[in-house]
Amino acid sequence: MALLKDFFYQHDGDAALKGISHKNMLIKQSIIAYMAVNGQCTLAELTKALHISVPTMTKLVGELVGEDIVVDNGKVETAGGRRPNIFGLANTAIYFAGIDIGRDYLCCVLTDLKNNIIVSRTHTPFTLVDDAKCLADICAHINEFLDTCGVERSKILGLGACIAGRVNPQTGHSYMYFTGGEGSLKEAIERATGLGVLIENDTRARCYAEYYSGNTLDEKNVLYLHLGRGVAIGIIADGKLYYGKSGFAGEFGHTPFFNNEIICSCGKKGCLETEVSGIAIENKIVKKISEGVNTILRDKWAAGDSIHIDDIIAAAKNDDNLSIELIEEAGEKIGKSIAFLINIFNPEVVIIGGNMSHAGDYLMLPLKSATNKYSMNLVYKDTSFRLSQMGADAGALGAAMLIRNKVIGL
């Protein structure tokens, strides 16, 4: 039986992969990719779609069946005449791993070739810091997950990892974390795991998972606004992720919207993040409490515990006036910024995700009202709004989906 990696990780300089053998390997890869996108199909459908002769297709599909990558699912029902066999991918043949390296968590998923999540685990407590020890801990957690996920590593054909901040997927570099060592973040994780790795921005990975898993495929122009402890957007333009020149597109939180003196994490003043991010709201409530404003979170603050945006959302749902006011204030400011976005992009849908999306109407009502107020009327009417339907593992799932597409050539 051939190694699965032989179908995907090929080197033009390998003498063993020249001539007919090399051509057949490429056709097999195309067969797998076609089935991954279109599902079960007959030999006739494959030959027509891939422009391969019937004898060659029959031979290569037969080899894939023998290698346990493709399954013969028997005869398909037809109106009459000879019934052809229908073939599909084996669910247990190929897997991909996805890792979301968050500021305070590490989420790992294992997916099959059809993007179904087989295993999902979140590691907490975890703190993302820019040093060699943290990177070593991340690699150790990834290896532990790969060793205990229940699937042989030989069947895992790639690993997608997403992380906050500016990321260049082409070079594998993160420009916010782990910049001090030699080589890229991609290379560091590859050395530690022995797998091919793709590095992606976390918001873009969530956007991709949302688009392909959240029933939005009918829309081709989508904005995904991630409101976590930071603020960023993912952009789907004409059905494809938009990257910009070096993969830095989407840093919307660092747009200078305000004339305040608050220094952002990017080093500049007045960024959108300084007023509406989860961290900004956390800082505001602490300031209000220290000034004597009443809230049910006062005891938590008095005990010396940090107040997280999730605590503020929970307090708002428990009718805490200060928490409600801060979330609604952020919602109004976010809505004004979204008006700026939709006037430029004219999207079909704006999806709100991240921790703050859990605030529901406390966030969405002022957000939509402000967007309506500050955007062009025709553009606003063109745009629908909804909260993300994805779970906490959306980033890891999106990263796994992206490495899957890269490996199988989609």
Image: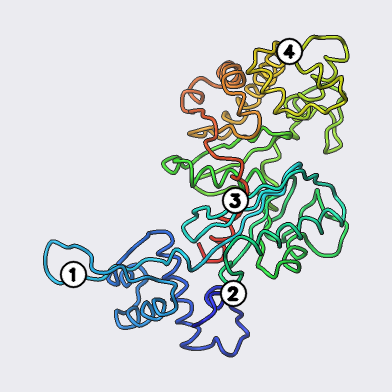
Q: Amino acid at mark 2?
A: Tyr
Q: Earlier in the sequence, mark 4 or mark 1?
A: 1
**CA gap, disc 4 and disc 3:** 36 Å
Q: Earlier in the sequence, mark 4 or mark 2?
A: 2
Q: Amino acid at mark 3?
A: Ser
| 281 relative to 124, above or below | above
Say which residue label 1 marks. Answer: 83
Q: Earlier in the sequence, mark 3 or mark 2?
A: 2
The label shown at residue 9 is 2
Q: Nearer the viewer, mark 4 or mark 2?
A: 4
Q: Secondary structure at mark 1?
A: loop
Q: List x then y, in percent, for residue 244.
A: 65, 49
**CA gap, disc 3 and disc 1:** 40 Å
Q: Quadrant of residue 171?
A: bottom right
Say which residue label 4 marks. Answer: 322
- Neighbourhood count class around disc 1 (C-alpha, 10 Å): few under 14, some 14–19, many 20 upward: few
**CA gap, disc 4 and disc 1:** 68 Å
Q: Residue at x 71, y 22 (%)?
A: 312
Q: Amino acid at mark 1?
A: Arg
Horizontal side of 238 relative to 168 (left or right) equals left
Q: Nearer the viewer, mark 2 or mark 1?
A: 1
Say which residue label 3 marks. Answer: 120
Of residues 237 and 225, the one drawn nearer to the viewer in this rendering? 225
Q: Residue at x 58, y 57 (%)?
A: 110
**CA gap, disc 3 and disc 2:** 26 Å
